[in-house]
Amino acid sequence: MVKNITIIFFTIFFLPQLIFCIDYNFTLNIDNEVEVGVPFRMDIEVMNNAKVDIQLLKQDDSISIKQAGVSKSLSLINGVQSLSVTNSYIITINSPGNYTIGPFRLSDKNETIEISSKSIKVIESSLSKTSVNISNSPDYLIQALVSKDSIYVNEYVDVDIVFYTTIEVRFNSYTSIQFPPNTWIENNKIGDDYRGKKNINNKIYDEYLIERKRVYINQPGVFKLESAHLDFYVFTRSSMFSFYSTPVSLETEPIVLTVKKLPDTQYVNKDIRVGKFKLDYTINKNEIIENSPLTLQLILQGVGDFHNIEDIPFRSNKEIEIFSSKSDLVKDNNQIVRKNWDILILPKEPGVHTIIFDDFVYFDPELKDFISINPDPITLHVKDDPSVSNVKKNSVIQDKIIIENPEKKFYISTILGKKNRVNYLQYNFYIIILIYISIIIIFLIHFFSKKLICITSLCIKKSPEIILKHELLIIKKNIHKYDSSKSLDAINLILINFIRAKSGLDVSNIKSNEIEVILKDKVSETMSLFIKKILTDLDYIRFSGIKISEDVIIKTCTDILSHLE
């Protein structure tokens, strides 16, 4: 009897626990010691349960944990089927010290358990920082190439960051050269474009273009620019089928750039540009008739500062009306820029009319002189409109008939009287229609006034937070249409634009260690730290080449949205 009761008690209380217990395996693919900044993998394997939610309970700010993927394994042994799901994570620790990875919480619809944490020691990095010197780095080097080291204000300088290597490497992260705040950067391009072989000191290197940009600085001074930094891994073969990687960091030599003021000039109230320019125009019609519109196209092309360039002013007499003007900017592969202004003009009267252009002034750095250019004046020979001429001619003939044939004057005047009567009725009809339309418009404005006020208030209150939330929701909605790299680039750009909008600064590059200062008093300290962490993680993932699943990207967007709320 007692035995039966014991069996029943065990069946009711302990057997379900054994059946529904979460079986797991928690492993780190390293020993107990790792260098700063070296990524390593963590696997959490769950057996016979494909619907377990994994949650990190606490995490040090120096630890970055990102999910790298999920793999499933199905096996059949002695007729018994078993399933295991492995969640893999990439971990990077940015400061030396003793850390614990975890704890984690595993939960499904029946049970929740905690995985105890694992200890790990992080030691100083053994990265070899090498200057740009071939003797110090025979297998790889980095160079900052500038087109000129002394320029005038708003004169362009081309900057290329080039990496040379003779061995196999994998790029990890890159920090660009930082320029002064009052800088306009054109054609900014960052990547690892392979450009072929190059012979340096009788040694053949593979050449990679890491960054290319054209820079305009609009304030004088002597600027010592910070070095660009490139982190990468060097792969060394340890046996026929295995390699080991060594982390390396290189930096360019500092660049000293002298920016000179423009010389004094007589053109004091001109929008003076720096470079080489040519100004011309085209007219789309040879034969011009009064009241017939035509397009005048102004063409400014050259190499130089086209940033926020003003319209080219011109003058004409009152018989020519200017209706509209639009412009566009076109660039070619030789860095020659062309800006077109399409101007719609309408000659109102026949005759000879002239359009005169004001001077366009620019400073030529090679000639070290100011140059004034303008196209030749445009002479328009405007002809009479044939249809208008015929109407005037018929009117003169009718007046002559009235004078020469007085006996028919009553008949003609009667006809004219009827015509005037018709015109009078038409004018009254138009006035009635206009009054009727005005009443309808007033009624609609009154009816929809509250809605219009509501919409206007929403537009006024549109904040950077609303824009950030809207764009993140778009990424989540369209996550299946793009690959992970484009989605990560989009999230990075959205956060950068959010920082610019909140800070009010038009900055070209934002360092992670400057985010807290830029966003101080703009957002909460928790939010600024979170944005800094997200951008740092995005930089690492984008440059390391790690494939990220859609679920991780969606979770990243969700985390950002939750911090906004």
Image: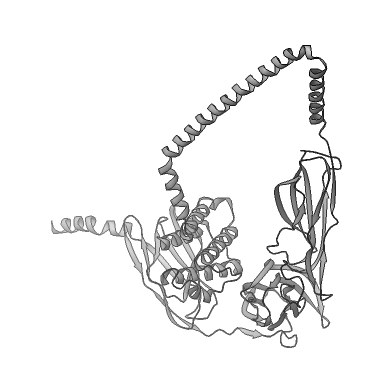
* Nearer to the camera, 115 or 294: 294
Q: Is residue 448 left or right of residue 34?
A: left
The outermost residue toward the bottom is 135
Q: Please, is residue 188 above or below residue 257 in the view?
A: above
Name the residue located 44 percent from the left edge and 35 percent from the top edge: 443
- Name which residue lies at 67% across and 19% down: 419
Q: For this view, does 304 lie left or right of residue 240?
A: right
Q: Quadrant of the C terminus?
A: bottom left
Q: Residue furthest left?
A: 1
User: Residue 284 location, x and y as percent?
Assistant: 82, 45
Query: How many numbered marks have been drawn onto this rendered protein structure?
Result: 0
Does residue 166 appear anywhere in the picture?
no
Q: Position of residue 199 (x, y in %)?
A: 82, 78
Query: In the image, residue 272 lies at what x, y percent?
Result: 74, 68
Q: How is the image coloured?
A: one colour
Q: Position of residue 270 (x, y in %)?
A: 73, 67
Q: Nearer the viewer, residue 197 or 432?
A: 432
Q: Is residue 21 above or below residue 180?
A: above
Residue ID at (70%, 74%): 168
Q: Is residue 458 above or below residue 88?
A: above
| Depth order, front residue of 532/172 | 532
Does any portion of residue 434 appear in the rendered image?
Answer: yes
Where is residue 56, by image quadrant? bottom left
Occupied quadrant, residue 398 = top right
Quadrant placement of the N terminus: bottom left
Residue located 75% across and 88% down the image: 135
